[in-house]
C-alpha cells in the first residue's frame, strides 16, 4: 500500500504534522526517540489495536462472522478480499 501523505515538511524529524511548529515537532521527535525500541514498538501495536477496534465498530452489527471478516479486510486494507 502506498502512502497518500504529502512529502514531509519536516523531513529531519520523521513527522508529517502540518499544524505544528518546527520547534514543537522537533521536541516531539526528540521525546519519541528517547523511548526504547520496545516502547516505540508497543506504541505502534497499541495504535494498530485501536485502529482495528475502530474499523470493527464501524461495521454493520448484523453481519455473520465470515461476512464481518471480509468487510473488515476490505475496509482496513482498502482492497477487495482475495477469495
Image (spheres, rainbow, N blue to C red):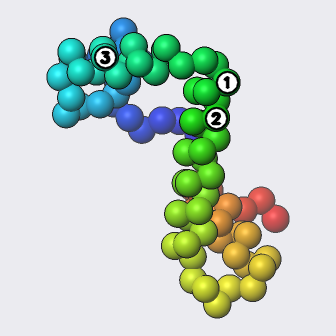
Between 10 and 2, the one nearer to me in the picture: 10
Q: Where is residue 4 shown, x and y percent of the image?
A: 42, 38
Left or right: 19 as drawn, with respect to 50: left
Question: Quadrant of residue 9 in the image?
Answer: top left
In which quadrant is the C terminus drawn? bottom right
Q: Where is residue 35 shown, x and y percent of the image?
A: 54, 19
Q: Is residue 60 above or below residue 2?
A: below
Q: Secondary structure at mark 3?
A: helix
Few, some or many C-alpha atoms within 10 Å of disc 2 (few <14, some 14-19, many ≥20)? few
Q: Residue at x 58, y 27 (%)?
A: 40
Residue highlighted by disc 2: 42
Q: Which mark is residue 17?
A: none
Q: Which mark is residue 38?
A: 1
Q: Where is residue 28 shown, x and y percent of the image?
A: 35, 22
Residue highlighted by disc 3: 27
Few, some or many C-alpha atoms within 10 Å of disc 1 (few <14, some 14-19, many ≥20)? few
Q: Residue furthest toward the top?
A: 12
Amino acid at each position: 500500500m502506498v502512502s497518500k501523505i504529502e512529502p514531509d515538511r519536516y523531513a529531519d524529524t520523521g513527522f508529517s504534522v502540518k499544524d505544528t511548529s518546527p520547534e514543537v515537532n522537533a521536541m516531539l521527535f526528540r521525546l519519541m526517540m528517547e523511548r526504547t525500541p520496545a516502547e516505540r514498538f508497543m506504541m505502534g501495536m497499541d495504535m494498530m489495536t485501536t485502529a482495528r477496534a475502530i474499523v470493527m465498530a464501524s461495521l454493520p452489527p448484523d453481519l455473520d462472522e465470515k461476512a464481518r471478516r471480509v468487510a473488515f479486510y476490505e475496509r482496513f486494507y482498502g482492497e477487495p478480499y482475495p477469495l
